Image (tube, helix red, strand yellow):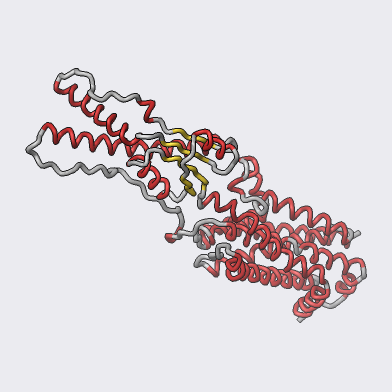
């Protein structure tokens, strides 16, 4: 009964704290809206490419047509075709209108066919002993495609794009070589009726996301920001929780609670249960924002996966860790201002290194190693496991154990410090 009264007392104190309620519920909702809208284009640049590419096609033949179709099929480029000079194309790239420019010279396809036939003739002549010079020698400089890159393009990205375009052109060259070989064989064996040689690639690749239970969830801004800022809000309850503890200590309420029959532990449990319930309400609210409100703004809908029970367990574990941290801050702080300053700064630091502000997958190597000390990172990795990889309890258990241990250590620290104060 004393536990229920303690929970009711915490509830009454909390609803009178309008600023605390705003921190708990309004702040994370606003942050999710703002940060998700800001970061959405950045996440899309990682997962869905739309690189602006300019093509100046003076060839308008098989090579340029095949090249453009291959680039469109990759879904990596936003292609614009213009009939302008090389200098004009270079200027548009330099001005930042396009990231890449490709200029295809006149008669490139025709020269490629002639050169392919020339190489096939040379190859067959080597077998027959005919060393005569090729009938149609072509200067390879007439087969040079010009690539322009924006100066801001990173070297690694430039190399990747150049290699991709070179790979496409190599496939086109091989197809032309096979066609030339087929035509040459028909010349040498006019009475035969061979079928056209199949030039389809023999070795192919397939792509999929490596995940459990055949999950194909693709990371996006919503699936990062909803759990990230939910965890941030959970840990920010340290401010109203610590303020409540300090207020009881300064106005004498804590002393009166100690004189009441029963153990003081019921009072602590009442605080913990109240704020864990608040954390779960925060979590439910943020899920609703991700599921129903963000899609109305043109953002992706949050995909929560199939393991809803495990999802609730992660939220509960994160709530335990946040409550333990709030108890510790309230116990060691001597004033409300001190608790607010220390709690807010410490949570912001934990959030920054834990991957809330900037996802860990874009952090430098040193920061990635440092992020593992943050309890917000443990919770975030657990949410990632459910949202993105469809993990079950077994896979996220290490992160849950870290959160439970953090709760145990902070709670024990609070009791020991409180006991030390009482003995003075």
Above or below residue 182? Residue 336 is below
Q: Residue furthest front?
A: 84
395 with respect to 314 (left or right) = left
Q: Quadrant of residue 369?
A: top right
Residue pictured at 42% horizontal, 39% vertical: 165
Where is residue 253? Give x, y as percent.
89, 72
Where is residue 75? Give x, y as percent.
45, 51
324 with respect to 302 (left or right) = right
Q: Quadrant of residue 57?
A: top left
Where is residue 406? Give x, y as percent.
68, 57
Residue pictured at 51% horizontal, 65% vertical: 305
Res 145 visible: yes
Q: From the viewer's side, name the closer residue of 207 and 314.
A: 207
The N terminus: image quadrant: bottom right
Q: From the viewer's side, name the closer residue of 34 and 109.
A: 109
248 with respect to 95 (left or right) = right
Q: Which residue lies furthest to the bottom in this view?
A: 1
Where is residue 321? Give x, y as percent.
69, 61
Q: From the viewer's side, name the closer residue of 138 and 405.
A: 138
Residue pictured at 59% horizontal, 71% vertical: 292
């Amino acid at each position: 009964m004393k536990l229920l009264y303690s929970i009711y007392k915490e509830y009454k104190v909390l609803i009178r704290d309008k600023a605390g309620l705003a921190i708990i519920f309004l702040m994370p909702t606003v942050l999710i809206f703002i940060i998700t809208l800001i970061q959405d284009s950045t996440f899309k640049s990682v997962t869905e490419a739309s690189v602006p590419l300019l093509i100046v096609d003076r060839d308008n033949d098989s090579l340029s047509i095949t090249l453009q179709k291959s680039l469109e099929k990759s879904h990596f480029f936003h292609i614009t075709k213009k009939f302008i000079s090389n200098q004009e194309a270079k200027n548009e790239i330099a001005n930042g209108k396009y990231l890449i420019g490709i200029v295809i010279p006149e008669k490139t396809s025709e020269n490629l066919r002639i050169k392919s036939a020339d190489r096939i003739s040379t190859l067959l002549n080597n077998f027959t002993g005919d060393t005569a010079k090729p009938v149609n020698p072509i200067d390879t400089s007439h087969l040079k495609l010009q690539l322009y890159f924006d100066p801001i393009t990173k070297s690694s990205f430039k190399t990747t794009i150049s290699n991709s375009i070179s790979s496409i052109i190599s496939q086109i060259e091989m197809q032309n070589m096979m066609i030339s070989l087929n035509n040459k064989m028909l010349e040498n064996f006019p009475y035969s009726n061979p079928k056209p040689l199949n030039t389809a690639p023999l070795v192919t690749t397939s792509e999929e996301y490596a995940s459990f239970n055949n999950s194909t969830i693709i990371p996006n801004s919503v699936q990062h920001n909803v759990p990230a800022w939910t965890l941030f809000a959970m840990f920010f309850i340290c401010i109203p929780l610590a303020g409540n503890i300090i207020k009881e200590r300064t106005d004498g309420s804590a002393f009166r609670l100690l004189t009441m029959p029963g153990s003081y532990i019921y009072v602590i449990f009442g605080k913990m249960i109240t704020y864990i319930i608040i954390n779960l309400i925060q979590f439910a609210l943020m899920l609703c924002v991700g599921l129903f409100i963000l899609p109305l703004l043109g953002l992706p809908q949050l995909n929560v996966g199939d393991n809803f029970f495990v999802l609730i367990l992660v939220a509960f574990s994160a709530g335990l860790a946040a409550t333990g941290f709030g108890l510790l801050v309230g116990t060691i702080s001597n004033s409300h201002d001190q608790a607010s300053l220390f709690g807010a700064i410490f949570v912001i630091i934990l959030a920054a290194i834990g991957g809330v502000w900037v996802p860990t997958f874009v952090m430098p190597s040193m920061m990635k190693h440092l992020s593992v000390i943050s309890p917000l990172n443990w919770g975030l990795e657990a949410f990632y496991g459910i949202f993105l990889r469809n993990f079950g309890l077994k896979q996220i258990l290490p992160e849950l154990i870290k959160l439970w241990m953090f709760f145990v250590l902070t709670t024990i620290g609070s009791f020991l410090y409180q006991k030390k104060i009482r003995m003075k």
